[in-house]
Image (tube, rainbow, N blue to C red):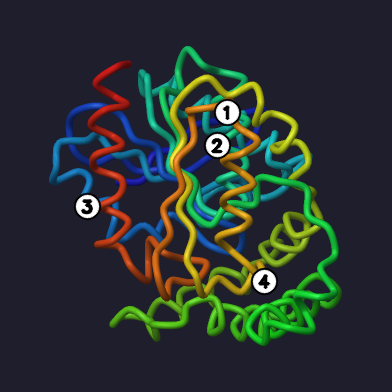
């Protein structure tokens, strides 16, 4: 059942399944909590209370927020964790990976650990060499530019085709659901606004994180010319010994949907040791 938390006159939608230590799931831009349709029930079946969140402006959460930065999203995730009674591990993908970093740094009393999937957690510089060398990176960048500049739904669908190299069995239905949601008034504007936000606020908080962090990247992620190198940089900017990098061969920007079994296998031991300490 969908629940709602009111924050500053707007609403965050989420659902909760399972019993046990709290895990908060947060998706990336242009998506919804439905992207965790494989991972959420698997975690609940293994003894976790899973709060699957539609981040602000997305899914069933309201539009019309004052901002869509990672800092803004982090505040919402902390509010959900407090409301449900943490401590919690936050699993955040893409923009929500950066938001999870900020949540951990600013609310260590309620955030016990972070799993970052394909995270945008560091300020990005223009990589002309990567665009020239790596075809998938160039193709993804081109489609994202169409979304940013023109709000192109076609461009977003083409980006998703690149970012999900191997499609789950329900992909056509999922793509239709995404298209319908982004066709609602205000949804594409939110996607564009999130595209324009810088990850610099998250990068500035990496050194302030005090809990364990697992960074997961896929080798076929089109958002970086070298996804492994980006993951290594995130870990390097954390305090020594807190970060761990896992690389999934062939996964794109949505490993939780493309390779959920691999993500689950990585997450379970991390959750067991992290929430056991909380």
Report which residue position mark 3 lands on. 41
Query: Which mark's residue is nearer the viewer, 1 or 3?
Result: 1
- Residue 103's spot in the image, x, y percent? 57, 28
Q: CA distance from mark 4 to mark 2?
A: 23 Å
How many labels, in total? 4
| Residue positioned most to the top | 109
Q: CA distance from mark 1 to mark 4?
A: 28 Å
N-terminal-most mark, 4 or 2: 2
Task: Name the secondary structure under disc 2.
Answer: helix
Asked if marks 4 and 2 touch (Cβ < 8 Å), the reply is no
Q: CA distance from mark 2 to mark 1?
A: 5 Å
Residue plotted at (77% across, 79% down) = 131
Q: CA distance from mark 4 to mark 3?
A: 33 Å
- Residue 57's spot in the image, x, y percent? 63, 51
Give the number of the disc on residue 103: 1
N-terminal-most mark, 4 or 3: 3
Residue plotted at (26% across, 28% down) = 273
Q: Is residue 140 left or right of residue 91?
A: right
Report which residue position mark 2 lands on. 100
Q: Estimate how packed mark 1 is, as few (under 14), some (14 to 19) or many (20 or more) residues with alpha carbons within 10 Å.
A: many
Query: Which mark's residue is nearer the viewer, 1 or 4?
Result: 4
Is 146 situated above or below 225? below
Task: Name the secondary structure under disc 3.
Answer: helix
Is 235 situated above or below 80? below
Asked if marks 1 and 4 touch (Cβ < 8 Å), the reply is no
Give the number of the disc on residue 225: 4
Q: CA distance from mark 1 to mark 3?
A: 24 Å
Q: Quadrant of the C terminus?
A: top left
- Residue 157's spot in the image, x, y percent? 59, 82
Task: Name the secondary structure under disc 4.
Answer: loop
């Amino acid at each position: 059942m969908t629940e709602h938390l009111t924050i500053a006159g707007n609403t965050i939608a989420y659902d909760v399944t399972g019993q046990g230590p709290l895990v908060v799931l947060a998706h990336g831009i242009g998506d919804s909590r439905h992207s965790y349709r494989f991972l959420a029930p698997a975690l609940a079946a293994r003894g976790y209370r899973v709060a699957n969140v539609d981040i602000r402006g997305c899914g069933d959460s309201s539009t019309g927020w004052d901002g869509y930065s990672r800092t803004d999203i982090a505040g919402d995730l902390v509010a959900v964790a407090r409301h449900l009674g943490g401590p919690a591990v936050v699993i955040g993908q893409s923009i929500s990976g950066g938001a999870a970093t900020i949540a951990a740094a600013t609310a260590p009393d309620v955030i016990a650990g972070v799993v970052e999937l394909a995270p945008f957690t560091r300020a990005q510089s223009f990589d002309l060499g990567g665009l020239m060398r790596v075809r998938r990176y160039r193709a993804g960048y081109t489609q994202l530019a169409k979304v940013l500049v023109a709000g192109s739904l076609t461009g977003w669908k083409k980006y998703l085709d690149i970012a999900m190299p191997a499609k789950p069995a329900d992909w056509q239905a999922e793509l239709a659901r995404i298209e319908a949601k982004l066709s609602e008034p205000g949804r594409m504007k939110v996607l564009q606004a999130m595209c324009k936000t810088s990850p610099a606020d998250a990068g500035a908080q990496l050194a302030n994180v005090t809990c364990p962090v697992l960074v997961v990247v896929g080798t076929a992620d089109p958002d970086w010319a070298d996804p492994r190198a980006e993951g290594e940089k995130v870990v390097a900017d954390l305090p020594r010994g807190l970060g761990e990098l896992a690389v999934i061969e062939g996964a794109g920007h949505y490993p939780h949907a493309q390779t959920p079994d691999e993500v689950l296998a990585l997450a379970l031991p991390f959750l067991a040791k992290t929430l056991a300490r909380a």
